Image (cartoon, rainbow, N blue to C red):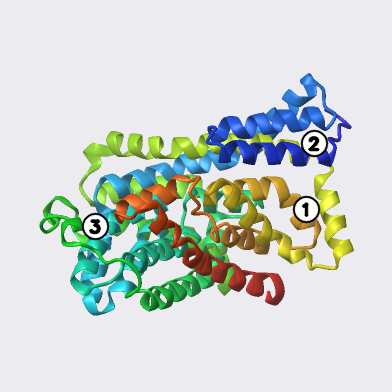
Amino acid sequence: MDGLTISWIGALIGLALAIILILRKLNPVYALFLGAIVGALIGGANLEETVSVLVNGTQSVMGTVLRVLAAGVLAGVMMESGAAETIAQAIVRKFGGSRAILALSLATMIITAVGVFIPVAVLIVAPIALSVGNKMGISKVALLLALSGGGKAGNIISPNPNTIAAARGFDLDLSRVMLAGLVPALCGLAVTVLVASLLKNKGIKVADNEIPGGEVDMSKYPPLGRAIVAPLVAVVLLMINPIGSISGIQALASFKVDAMYILPLAGIIGMLAMRQGGKILQYTSSGLSKMTATVLILIGAGGIAGLISASDLSSQVVSLIEASGISGTFLAPISGILMAAATASTSTGVILATGSFGEAILNMGTAPLAAAVMVHTGATVIDSLPQGNYFHVTADAMKMTIRQRMGLIPYEAIVGGTMTIVATILYGFIF
């Protein structure tokens, strides 16, 4: 492998092949590996060197894999214990029907922000949304935009796999990336509520036979005070170091405990607070199973990352941008937008964007934190296309047809685009 440089043409062909195969419904892991193999061979590597390219690439994502698996403990606790449902119900009850769209958006944002996957967060809040929408006469497109937009906002400030991938892709602490996404997330929430409010009378409404039967039995869920313990512990521990750095308090700034320790610890403390300690095996097994698909995609994306890093593609990209006169800052959000659109997944888009274009982005003079936030927000713009599972999960949750669900994509892009523009202005040009 020493001295091997794969042609940028081979790297591009491999990346394109992987994307095409994903669009053709081949398992993403195999698509990514096959793209990496074909790209390396076309780019000038022999069979032995191609294996080394893939091995080196997959080894580079092992740090992210460890943190994603650790996050599974917190995710499993929040989903399986009913803590997420408790939080969602409390938020909607607090705001009442007159502010239903804000309540639904905020509930989904918070559920996602505390470590629940965005499709699961939408599934949790969807029955509440259908019931509220039926009573208030709010259209389905407005309801789902409230859920999806709120979820997107929460996803960029969460300890979810996409945020972990953005942080590890640029060698940053998870807490710094989460905190840096806060302002774009709040802007995304505001735009979600505004656009959804404008759409509340557009399109079909929720029929009587589509609302869940009866009231939700909250007796089987933990009380709110216990339900918020796990996410509260996680947020407090993750924010100690950034707060110390900002405030200049050395004792706090020196607290450098990795998310790999914090997220499982928060999950276990929350489990004990909810008096569910006896279910630790059940909750952790569930969390692990939910992380398995993401981990496999991470490994597959590592193969493509190995191909790109062994090629001269990054230097070619930098030269092209310099010759065009376009600010190199835009490479970060554009790479996130394109990779997430190709894979119809925020997390996979971030993984591919950081692995494939991370070096080129940094070579353009973009700071690591700025690069992470811009790639991350960019991956939320058009990540809900039909080739991904999120599109179909959310359509089923809100009892919408494929055509009805397709009509929501431009509005989701407005939310993601807003967060990307805000992040690019803040971190690409101001800070």
Image coordinates of residue 174 in percent, x first then y, are 54, 55
Name which residue type carries label 1: Ala
Return the residue at label 1.
360
Label 2 to label 3: alpha-carbon separation: 48 Å
User: From the viewer's perspective, is residue 41 above or below residue 207?
Assistant: above
Mark 1 in CB contact with mark 3 (< 8 angstroms) = no
- Front-lying residue, 72 or 322: 322
Q: Residue 187 bears which disc, if any?
A: none
User: From the viewer's perspective, is residue 17 above or below residue 198?
Assistant: above
Q: Residues within 10 Å of mark 1 (few under 14, many from 20)?
A: many
Return the residue at label 2.
10
Residue drawn at 20 percent across, 62 percent down: 207
Name which residue type carries label 2: Gly
Looking at the image, tell me whether mark 1 or mark 3 is earlier in sequence order: 3
Q: Secondary structure at mark 2?
A: helix
Return the residue at label 3.
127
Residue drawn at 47 percent across, 53 percent down: 159
Label 1 to label 3: alpha-carbon separation: 44 Å
Question: Residue 199, located in which quarter of the rendered image?
Answer: bottom left
